[in-house]
Image (cartoon, rainbow, N blue to C red):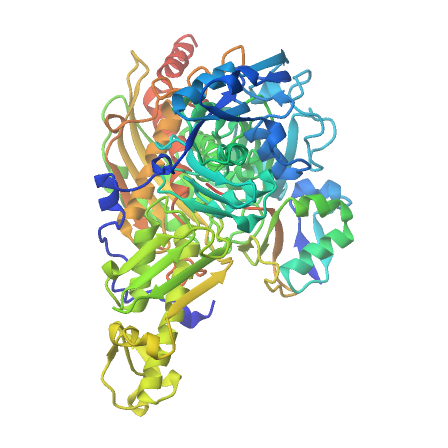
Amino acid sequence: MVEVNLWSGLRALADGKDKVEVEATTVGEVLDGLVKAHPGLKDAIDAGVSVAVDGRVIASSLTEPIRPDSEVFLMQRLKGG
Amino acid sequence: MALDSLKSEGFKQVGTRPDRPDGFDKVTGRAKFGADATAPGMLHAAIVRSPHAHARITRIDTSKAEALTGVKGVVTRADFATGLKGENWNILENVMAGDTALYDGHAVAAVAATSPLIARDAAKLIEVEYEILPHVTDVDEAMAEGAPVIREGAADKSVPPGLHPNVVRYHESGHGDVDKGFAEADLVIEDHFRTEATHQGYIEPHACLATLGGDGKGELWCCTQGHWNVQKICSALLGLETSQLRVTASEIGGGFGGKTTVFIEPVALALSRKTNKPVKLVMSRSEVFRATGPTSSTSMDVKIGMKKDGTITAAQGVFRLQGGAFPGAPCEFTAMCAFAPYALKNVHQVGYDVIANRPKQAAYRAPGSPMAAFAVESVIDELCGQLGLDPIETRLKNASKRGTKASFGPTFDQIGLVETLEAAKAHPHYSAPLKPGQGRGISCGFWFNHGGETAVSLALSEDGTAQLAVGTPDIGGSRASMALMAAEELGIPYENIRVTIADTATLGYNEVSHGSRVTYASGLATIEAARDAVKKLCARAAAKWGIPEDAVKWENGCAVPSGPNAGDFDPLPIDQITKRMGATGGPIVGHFEATPEGAGVSFATHIVDAEVDPETGKTSVVRYTVVQDAGKAIHPTYVEGQFQGGAAQGIGWALNEEYIYGEDGRLQNAVFLDYRIPVASDLPMIDTVIVEVPNPGHPYGVRGVGETSICPPLAAIANAVSAAAGVRLHELPMSPPRILTALEKQRDG
C-alpha cells in the first residue's frame, strides 16, 4: 500500500481524509486507486494533477514507478509562463 | 536517469558565451515575426469588440459591413464548433463571445477585407445591440455578497459551500498547527496586501496568417510560445482533425507566458475558411491590453509569528486572485509558493480563484508566485525590523534545504536557496553604505519549474555539421543553449550546428515554452538525441574497422577505439563518417522523444537599493543585484539576461504598471503612454550572480531560470521603498500618488 497525501482542499471530496492508502506501483495506479476509493476526487484529478514522488514532481508520466515507502503528494498540475 | 549519463565537469563548450545564432537576422531585420508573413490574395481582418464590461448580446447585424466594397466575409460565434466542454469552451468563449460580452474588449464579431483600412471600416458597420448588465472588476467586490454573478455554475467542486458564485476554485494546503505556532512566537504580524493586474508587455503584438480550406486542411503562421498547443486548441475550436492543421511558429518578440494560449488565431482561421483566402490578423496595442491575458490582481492576508532569535514559528496566508471572466487564476501556485523558501513546522495557505468582468488572465513568468512573495517577504521584513534582526541571517536561519518538508507538502531534494543567501550576504552590495533617503530591501523567491512533452531530432550533414530541430519556440536564447549542448556531445564547433524551431508536421508533440522548461527539457532531449547520433556514428566506425560497436567510443568529434584491446586505428573524424553515410547505412539522425520529469525547483535572492523623493513620491531604483540558482548555466550571458529581465519587469510591476478600470468597467489605460513599463532610463545596471547547485534530474544539472527571477522583485523593491520612505507600502504599484498618500497618512498619524 502507498500512502497518498492530498492537499487540504480535497478533504471534502475524500470523506474528510487528507491521507489515503491505495494499492499502487505507478503514478497512474495511484490516480486510479484514489478515484476508486473516493469517486468524489475524479473531477479534481481529471482537471489535471501532478504527483510528487519522493520530492520529484511528476507532471504527466503515469508510468513513473512508486515504492511502498515512497513519499507521495497529490498536487495541482503545474503550469508556467 | 542513469548516473553514468550525468556530467558535472570537464565541459569544453557549455558555460562559454558564443554569439547568439539569431542575432544577425534580428539586427538586420531579416528575422520574420508574426506580422511579417504574406500570401498571394491575402485578406486583412479586424475584430469588433464589446465596449461594455458586461452585456447581453441581443442582436448582431452584419449586412452593412458585408455590403461594403472589399469585404469578403464576416464571422461570429456561429462560425465555430459547438458542444465544447471544459477549458476548450472557456477559450472559445474568450476568443469570440457567445450570448454575453464578459469584459470591455471581448470579441463579438470579425471581418475580412482586401485591406486593413476596409476591414477596420467594415468592423464599424457591424451593428451590435447590447443589454447592459451589472459588472464588477475588483477581486474583493467580486467575492462580496450581492456582487453581480459573472456566470452561474462556473465553480468546480473544490469550492466550499456558502461562497459567492464568482469564487470558482479553491485551494488549501499546509501542515502542523498554526495556532500553536503563533502562541510560541514573541512577535506576530498580520497584514493585508493588494496588487493590480499587470501585462507582460511583450513588444510584439499577437499576429498570424491563416489559410484554411473547405477540405479541412490548414496552415497557420503565428507568434506563439507553443505551436502544438495552438494546433490542438484551434483544431478543437474549429472542428478540424488536428493533423490537418500545420502550425509554424514565427520569431517571437516576447511572450513571458502571455503567448501560451490563443486569442486571434482561431478567428483568422474561421475567416479564411469562410472566404477561402489567406487571412492576416494583427492586434493593435490597445487590443493587446484589452483582450489578451494580463496577470491576476490580488487581495492577500498574511500572518507570521517569529521568535526573538528569528525562528519563524508559524505562517498563514489567504490569497484571493481575480483572473478575469473565466476560471484559471493561479491561486494554487500563489498559495504553494508563498512560504516555500522556509522550513516551517506550522503553515497554512488558502487560495481563491475569483472571476470578474476583466479579460481572461494568462501566465506571466512564475504565475502567482511574485504576488505571494510580495506579501510574505514584506511581513518577514517587518518582523526583522521590529525584532532588530538581519534580514539575510533571518532568512538563512529559516531557509529550506535538502530534506525540508516544503510548505506545500513534499520533501525537497537538492536545492540552492542557502547558497543564494550566502552569496547575497557576501556580495559587496549588501554591505555598501546607503545615502540619506535610500533604503535597502531583500527578498527570496521560489518557482517550481517544469518538464513536459518534448521531441527533438538531430540530423547530421555530409560535411559533419548538424541540423537540430526542436519544437520549443525560442523565447529566451534557447537556440544558443541547444547548440552548445549538442556541440558538447558531438565534439564539433558551436557554429557547426544550426538550430531550427520545427513546425508541427515535423516533430512529435512539444509542450509550450513555459514553466522555465526549455533549456531543461529540450536541452535534455538535445543531449540525448546527440548521444543517439554518436552511438550511430560509433557503429559506422566499428563496421569500417571490423570491431564490435562497444569497442568504439567518441572523443573530440572523432570515433576512436575504446581501449588498447579494441585495435590500433587512427581517430575517425565526424566528417569522414558522414561523407560516406549514404553508402554505409543511410542518413544518421539522432532522436529523443519523452516527457522529462526531473525539472528541479529554483530559488533566488534579490538585493535592492531605492531612493524615494518625499516631494513627488517618485522612486528611483539605484542599485539592484540578482542572485539565483541556475543549476548549471549553459550560456551564462543568456542566464544573466533572464535574471536581469525578471528584475526589470519586476521593477515595472512594483512601481508603475497597473490595469486601471473606470466606474463603467472599461479599461482606462490601454496604450503604453498610459501604462508605464520601465524604459532604460528607469533602470540601474542590474548585477547578477549565478549560483550553480546542480539539478539531479538533468544530465548537466540545468534548472530553469526564466521565471524565478520575477518572484522576489516586488517584495525586495517594496522593502527598499518602505525603508527609504519610512512607511510600509501594502499595495502595488507603489506609484508616486500612492507613496505620497502613505507619507501623508503617516504625517497625519
Question: On the image, which quarter does residue B626 sit in?
Answer: top left
Q: As drawn, is B643 to the left or to the right of B128?
A: left
Q: As drawn, is B317 to the left or to the right of B707?
A: right
Residue B550, position as x, y percentages in the image: 39, 83
Residue B182 higher or lower than B577, as above or below: above
Task: Report the front residue among B320 and B211.
Answer: B211
Task: Tell which residue pokes out farthest to the top in this image.
Answer: B748
Q: Is residue B248 visible?
A: yes
Question: On the image, which quarter does residue B365 sit in?
Answer: top left
Question: On the image, which quarter does residue B118 sit in?
Answer: top left
Residue at the image position 47 percent from the left and 40 percent from the top: B211
Residue at the image position 64 percent from the left and 35 percent from the top: B170
Residue B187, position as x, y percentages in the image: 51, 31
Residue B321 higher or lower than A74, as above or below: above
Residue at the image position 35 percent from the left and 89 percent from the top: B547
Residue B552 higher or lower than B87, as above or below: below
State the quadrant of the C terminus of chain B: top left
Task: Report the front residue among B117 and B516.
Answer: B117
Task: Report the front residue among B468 and B4.
Answer: B468
Residue B330, position as x, y percentages in the image: 55, 36
Task: Report the front residue among B513 and B617.
Answer: B513
Q: How many marks?
A: 0
Residue at the image position 61 percent from the left and 13 percent from the top: B130
Q: Is residue B633 visible?
A: no
Residue B389, position as x, y percentages in the image: 39, 35
